[in-house]
Image (cartoon, coloured by chain):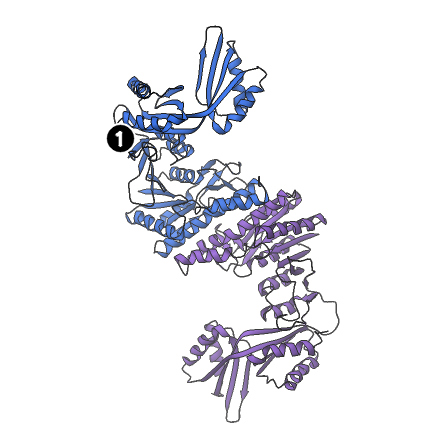
Chain colours: A blue, B purple
Amino acid sequence: MLIVQKYGGTSVGTLERIDEVAKRVIKTKDAGNDVVVIVSAMSGVTNKLIEYAEYFDKNPSEREYDMLLSAGERVTSSLLAIALTAKGYPSVAFSGRQAGIKTDDFHTKSKIEVIDPVAIQNALKDGKIVVVAGFQGVNKNGDVTTLGRGGSDLSAVAIAGALKADLCEIYTDVDGVYTTDPRIEPKAKKLDKVSYDEMLELASLGAKVLLNRSVELAKKLNINLVTRSSFNEHEGTLITGENSMEGVIISGIALDRNQARVGIRDIEDKPGVAAKIFKKLSQKEINVDMIIQNVGKNGVANLSFTVPQNELDKAVSALNNLGENLNVESDSDIVKVSIVGIGMKSHSGIASTAFETLANNGINIQMISTSEIRISVIVDAKYGELAVRLFHDAYGLNA
Amino acid sequence: MLIVQKYGGTSVGTLERIDEVAKRVIKTKDAGNDVVVIVSAMSGVTNKLIEYAEYFDKNPSEREYDMLLSAGERVTSSLLAIALTAKGYPSVAFSGRQAGIKTDDFHTKSKIEVIDPVAIQNALKDGKIVVVAGFQGVNKNGDVTTLGRGGSDLSAVAIAGALKADLCEIYTDVDGVYTTDPRIEPKAKKLDKVSYDEMLELASLGAKVLLNRSVELAKKLNINLVTRSSFNEHEGTLITGENSMEGVIISGIALDRNQARVGIRDIEDKPGVAAKIFKKLSQKEINVDMIIQNVGKNGVANLSFTVPQNELDKAVSALNNLGENLNVESDSDIVKVSIVGIGMKSHSGIASTAFETLANNGINIQMISTSEIRISVIVDAKYGELAVRLFHDAYGLNA
């Protein structure tokens, strides 16, 4: 098999850890696989480099900022290749450029445009282990670019795609994807398998194992992703397109504390007001999530929607400056609890279980939204963790 | 003018120091010059990276070792460009590759083959200050190479040559080239000007301001070099081809403690024995310096020569294994004291002053060698510093 492995910052956080990673890579190679390894910077290094840059400028020139930050991953990749070669496994370190990763021009948050995998393929043909500096590429001018948050995961998935790898393993310091946050519900269990779409919902709702852009790319390229720990031998969680199980499965319960509710009461029920509101919010690049509108008796409506907490002030101020004399109120003391699983919409019982469970425990549902694979409810912040535990039990995840 | 400035490790050793360097660069720019800056790694960084590599392998794979070490200069160049841009002086950081520095394939000690200065020239045309990561280039495969000890100086001189710069300033933590080591003779004075050839003798004899390969390249490319301190505003020392002074000038006294003497007594005076000895030493890559042979009465000769102290054991063992049953003795308790200055050979008084000075002070000369611009004597190690001080006075350098 051709296996791509990515090791995050804590996995390569010390020289001893890099040595451990080398052993794991060798084990994979010894099992008869071709191996391409993508590495992050040693934990702490990127933050130190950011501090350095910000000593001179809070908004440092972006082209140079990218060149600066890319040094961290270059160091790790060189060291791992040296470690592997020292152990008798010829290895070569590639920068993003040398690995053929071509990006667009948007420094500090570039997108990968294309990967030319020839150099990697030639090194593999020579029997070498290839170690690639994650998080980085080059634009058409040959300037170093970086891929933004979660960039090394993205490097790994994109390289796996370009090489048509059989598997892309993402190593972190957690064992995989859990049915919910084990700090909230100790009975939370690691999932053996989850679909791309479920993972997307779980990731966007607070499971921090993988960022959405990596999962989206894996889905698009149809890459089998495994997320697992480099600190033990436990099997991780396979994230894949297929799902052999029949019917509905609840894969997890997610808690999102970064939510705030904006309410606008007594809006005149004339066409165009709601449109004007959301156009304004969109112009201000505010991410609106759930929206509820109730039309009342007297031709007036109540409108509610949620935004990320750190965009709340901007949203309220945008609405107050709209010139419509709106009656705006806001509440950041709420959370979103989500039940994620495939085939949900065709099973109305799923929703009724949620309502019943909360009602039986005196928890009021402020807002609801549903998708193909998710039901989310907005509740008072103080009930958030309780709701997670109740759902975890109600949907049989404690078993 | 077009000025190339190179700042060494201590000059960019902290963020505060990089800020000071930025101010100095800006002063040069504000005076109406185009400026290209070459930087070393922050002091300590390269050693730390070497330690990291040696944790895995005392002889790390060289290609990866070069990629690893090159990260240090990339960080400094990015930071300085960020600092300059933040102060309102648009600046661009280039890696060795981006600066067009093409080298041969000898990792860890590459030679610069050619510099394509177009990218630097275009950036200068745009009014930018160009900051280049020193010590590094790329080979024809696009792999990062490093230039070995003194590599950043070499980057600076080579770039100055490719750009036909008017001046190449090498900034360190010393004020320039001195008539001798001020720790030995407090009356030592900084030289305003010295020729390439004198500098070559002074450098090879222990004045550690500049390594010979940089001076040799400056001479070849006819680059006016200035070595000065980045920690004060003192004028430095100009190293140049021309020398407007007439006649003989003693520019300095150098002390080389890294010398050992090998003596071979009672060699049969038959043709070929000496040739055999030096051929063997050359095969073993031992650097033989001074050679003296005295032919005695009975057809036997005494041969003496000097080698660097750290090659003494290798030299003695090579001779003992030559199969000629040689009577080999060695002495590492010696030093070489050299008087350096132009036009020396045509002034026999220079040599006689040296002999007289030492004789008057009871110092025995074990060996002597002379060149166009240098007289060197080997004396007992214990007399080394005294000899330096005596010469410094005798040749009028105390004045």
Farthest residue to the top: give it: A298
Residue A2 location, x and y as percent? Answer: 33, 42
Q: Residue at x 40, y 82 (%)?
A: B323
The reply to whether residue A67 is in sight is no
| A388 lies above or below A364 | below
Q: Nearer the viewer, residue B281 or B184?
A: B184
Q: Quadrant of residue A322?
A: top right
Q: Nearer the viewer, residue A326 or B3?
A: A326
Numbered disc 1: secondary structure: loop
Q: Quadrant of residue A392?
A: top left
Say which residue label 1 marks.
A398
The reply to whether residue A275 is in sight is yes
- Are there few (<14), some (14-19), or many (20+) residues within 10 Å of tag 1? some
Q: Residue at x 51, y 88 (%)?
A: B301
Image quadrant occupied by the C terminus of chain B? bottom right
Q: Quadrant of residue A160?
A: top left
The tally of labels here is 1
Q: Is residue B331 left or right of residue A29?
A: right
Q: Nearer the viewer, residue A127 or A279?
A: A279
Residue A186 location, x and y as percent? Answer: 30, 35
Farthest residue to the bottom: give it: B298
Q: Chain of mark 1?
A: A
Q: Nearer the viewer, residue B349 or A118?
A: B349
Q: Amino acid at mark 1?
A: Asn
Residue A27 location, x and y as percent? Answer: 30, 49
Residue B99 location, x and y as percent? Answer: 57, 49
Q: Residue at x 28, y 18 (%)?
A: A349
| A299 lies above or below B173 | above
Farthest residue to the left: give it: A399
